[in-house]
Amino acid sequence: MTYKEAIDWLYGTQQFGIKLGLEQPRRILRELRAYPAAGVRVIHVAGTNGKGSTCAMIDAIARSCGLRSGLFTSPHLIDFRERVRVDGAEISEEETAQYLTEIRELVASWEHHPTFFELTLALSMLHFKQQGCEVIVLETGMGGRLDATTAVPADVAVITPVAMDHSQWLGETLAEIAAEKAGIMVAGRPVLSSAQTHEAKDVLKKHAHDIGSPIQFITEPYNDSAISLAGPHQLYNASLAIAAAQQAKFPVTAKVISDALAKVNWPGRFERCSAPDLPAEIILDAAHNPQAAEALTKTWQEQYPHSKATMIFGAVEGKNTELVISILSRIATHIHLTPIDSPRSLSSDELACSVHVDTPHTIHANIADAIDSACHQATDSPILICGSIFLIGHIKAMLSQESSRPSSQ
């Protein structure tokens, strides 16, 4: 297959939906012989918020140590190949086509077809093995216990802050969701966790005890050097990433850490950008749940203590949009509510139902009109574009004049 044919086939598998479970990903990894070779260190990261940033920091530290590092994350912002990187470089189109052709031939006769996410994981693991990665950093797609990434046993399990999200899949209580995240732990192997609520902490401690895994809660921020990612919460993510690197026995030094954290990049998280035809500075942030909205609000107040934002916001179904908008309204003068390019997008009317009476002036428009209107209103204040990662990807592609192809998974 050509690259286009391969990606068209892969995207077509989204029709099989989301299927949580480990039997299928284990089979495909086994038959492809894509499991990591002996001695390759695997760090697996689960949690509700901060997974991607923490993965990016671990990957940056590994590379700063001189280790060859593979990074698997999801979803992507603009290009599918963002999900699979080795030493910071995206997988090539040629390699993507080659591996997907091999995978398609393997699964063609299977009674139960693998999902988009399972196939993407298999592609990444093939690439990491072919590239001779010494470290693999895996971000869970959703949950942990039955997430496809858990088919790859971790040497170190890392759990970022746990909060309510994906309740239709993971449970209606914080304890139930924490139990799903705890499922990435491997018996006898170390577990690192961010500070958690009492409810989540109790669940994680019990599960670690039950399987004989030592667990450590990392509760202090990193303050030894500058970090390229903005926001107080990133200092805690940095401490967690450093602890993971130490547990994985990376040859870390203070200089290795400071060099890595000074240049780590994770797009779409308080990302500053601009465009020649737009008068205001633009901030992009994929804050889509209440905890992420709180982190964004604190970061904004730290970075722009004397300014409020002209905000553009879009969301998909299944999120606590009412609370998210309420939190973000503290830093906004106007909020432009816009539907986004996703089959799960909330419509303008649905977004309007999430707005409180005391929320700053709200305007309903499509994305292009929202940006145009926001630019007219933003004079001395920056424009904050936030909410769904699909909105952030759309805007990034538009500003960079690239074509984007979002996925629903």
Image (tube, rainbow, N blue to C red):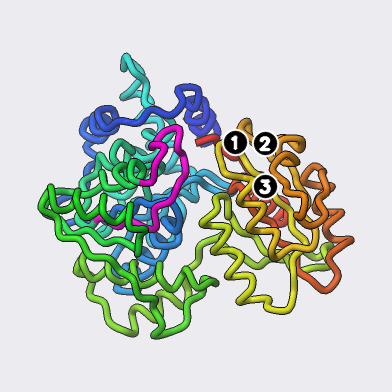
Q: CA distance from mark 2 to mark 3?
A: 16 Å
Which quadrant holds residue 172? top left
Instruction: Return the disc, 1 or 2, that comes first in the chain's sequence.
Output: 1
Residue at the image position 45 percent from the left and 37 percent from the top: 167
- The residue where tag 1 is placed is 317
Foreground residue, 109 or 350? 350
Q: Secondary structure at mark 2?
A: loop
Give the residue type that dot 2 points to: Leu
* Badge nearest the viewer, 2 or 3: 2
* Badge nearest the viewer, 3 or 1: 1
Mark 1 in CB contact with mark 2 (< 8 angstroms)? yes
User: Is any atom of residue 333 visible in this view?
Assistant: yes
- The residue where tag 3 is placed is 394
Instruction: Return the disc, 3 or 1, that comes first in the chain's sequence.
Output: 1
Residue at the image position 55 percent from the left and 53 percent from the top: 290
* Mark number, residue 346: 2
Left or right of residue 128, residue 154 in this image: left
Give above or below for 44 relative to 17: below
Residue bounds of the magenta highlight: 157-174
Give the residue type that dot 3 points to: His
Left or right of residue 352, residue 151 in this image: left
Q: CA distance from mark 3 to mark 1?
A: 18 Å
Whole-percent x and y of residue 10?
A: 47, 30
Give above or below for 239 relative to 181: below
Whole-percent x and y of residue 73?
A: 42, 50
Give above or below for 284 relative to 119: below
State the residue lying farthest toward the right: 376
Foreground residue, 137 or 48? 48
Instruction: Return the disc, 2 or 3, that comes first in the chain's sequence.
Output: 2
